[in-house]
Image (cartoon, helix red, strand yellow):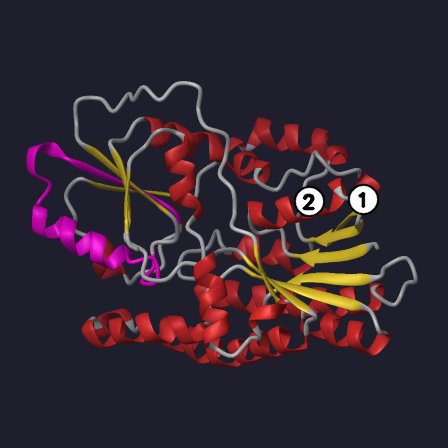
Amino acid sequence: MKWLFGSAANNAHTHQAALALFERDALGLYSSTGVITPDDRALLETVRRFAPRLAGKLDRRRLDFLPTKLLDCQWGWEAWRLAASRVPGSMLIQDWFWEKNERSLDRLWSRLLRQKRFDGFLGVEHGALTAVREARRLGKKSAVIFMSLHHSFYEKWIEPEYEKFPELLSPAARRLSDLARVRDRRRDEEASLADCVHANSELTRKTLVAAGVPAEKIFCVPLGAPPAADDFRRTPGKKLRILYSGPVSMRKGAHHLLLAWRKLKARRGAELHIYGIRLLPRQFCEGLAGVFFHGNVPSDELRAAYRGSLALVFPTLADGFGMVASEALAQGLPVITTP
């Protein structure tokens, strides 16, 4: 059985899913966005010469383990989204490009699925509905990967935060919250129509079952961890250095971390180093002694930060699987996080 796997190249999870299908000789095609293939190596080296930080980010999109003939790279709207991400305050513009990209790819995959070489379709939540519908029409199998908890879980844990911290509900956050309701209905329909659902953790599976998705159609495959470092010796330096990695958002609990740090007043020269895009309102991120915002950085730079810190603090409120925790532990870095 050959699967058409369609997904934006947004994290290691999707790449590992493609590799798993390939190892079982079940991958017909991996159609994705912004993938760097072995054929793009010369281009990547050119970018590395003139824009090393950009090259570091593109390294995350490298797919060296799949034959080029099994890859279909669609930059399209993704290129516009990446360009918009360079502009401060462009959260809603980036989101608009992301939505256009998801819908455009979904339509493409529904067309590709009509080819006889594909026996089924594997997609990722929100970006798979049109293709799943087409698979049912064609009598082919379909599966959807859920990387996040069911939206009812988010509503339980996230919405009360806006009551506690109304200043977090910026116009952009309010608009994204309204869009989320429409997008959640799309996810519900995907889970209902797909022949099976892949959950990335036991917690994700439980929230889907609680929301009414039949337990017998859910396959839980918890994510793995990166290879452990050969040497766990730390090089934290003289200062107490704490690390946070991930979107600086309310869902990740970043506001609680920053509020706690403000109360501590950075005693004894402690430092908090934050890696990830800032999504919280400006007032939460300013006037903090000993806090350094690094933005998104290449993987090698982040691993070095793990090695030079004393602990990762990850106060997430709702996560299907916090990859950052396993990445830190693989480097021997203690993790302070939520249940």
Residue 332 image position (x, y, % from top left): 35, 29
Tell me the quarter of the image containing the C terminus.
bottom left
121 relative to 224 in the view: left or right: right
Q: CA distance from mark 2 to mark 1?
A: 9 Å
Amino acid carrying mark 1 in the image: Asp
Q: Determine whether the residue tagged by mark 1 lies in a helix, strand or loop.
A: loop
Instruction: Point out which mark residue 320 bears.
Output: none
Mark 2 = which residue?
20
69 relative to 86 in the view: left or right: right
- Decide if residue 158 is in sight here: no
Number of other residues with Cα within 10 Å of mark 1, as a class: few under 14, some 14 to 19, many 20 or more: few
At horizontal 47% and vertical 80% (from top left) the residue drawn is 181
330 relative to 26 in the view: left or right: left
In the rendered view, would you say 101 is above or below 233?
below
Instruction: Point out which mark residue 25 bears.
Output: 1
Q: Which residues are magenta?
A: 249-276
In the rendered view, would you say 27 is above or below 109?
above
